[in-house]
Amino acid sequence: MKILVVNGPNLNLLGTREPEIYGTVSMEELKGMIAGRALQIGAEVEFFQSNQEGEIIDFIHRYRDADGMIINPAALTHTSFAIRDAISAVDMTAVEVHLSNIHSREEFRRISLIAPVCIGQISGFGIGSYFLGLEALVNHLGKGNTPGVGNV
């Protein structure tokens, strides 16, 4: 099972940017942790991070045959109709994740243009949001069960 892990703007600074909000784990460390967990549950992951909206869209198009996607669009969550349309265009099962709880932050961060084209959204658990998203997605794709119910 092939899962994309897509990260948007400024997530390349993970571990150093506002650690009180986003934590101290770097993107490279997080990638290793996610890849390890993915192997344990029978998935293979392909990572991508960009500060450019168009590059994210191109990546989604290029890997449209993947089984599913975990996406943290970062600030593009609130502004990108184009990423929303890209996910819809490739008809890929996706889970939106965020490190912080976007619903408890500034008003403008509480709106997600991406969530309506995803099977779910997980936010507020720090790097744990990625692992919860991965397990829910793999469970959903592989077993057809409700996320959180099953053997994953």
Image: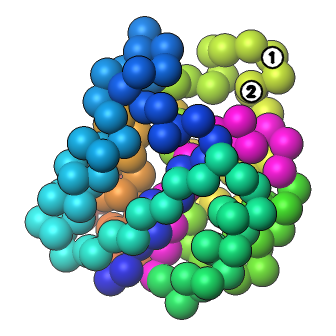
Q: Position of residue 22 (x, y in %)?
A: 45, 23
**In which image quadrant can residue 77 be found?**
top right
**Tag 1 and tag 2, C-beta contact below 8 Å:** yes
Bin the neighbour count of mark 1 within 10 Å (Cα to Cα): few under 14, some 14-19, many 20 and up: few
Residue 122 makes an appearance in the image: no
Determine whether, in the image, residue 16 is placed left or right of residue 28: right
Q: Position of residue 98 (x, y in %)?
A: 53, 37
Residue drawn at x 66%, y 63% is 56
Q: Which residue is mark 2?
A: 110
Residue drawn at x 63%, y 74% is 60
Q: Position of residue 136 (x, y in %)?
A: 38, 58
Q: Position of residue 119 (x, y in %)?
A: 59, 61
Q: Mark 2 is on which residue type? A: Arg
Determine whether, in the image, residue 151 is placed left or right of residue 78: left
Q: Which residue is mark 1?
A: 107
Give the spatial CA distance, label 1 vs label 2: 5 Å
> Which span of residues is magenta-colored?
67-80
Determine whether, in the image, residue 94 is placed left or right of residue 54: left
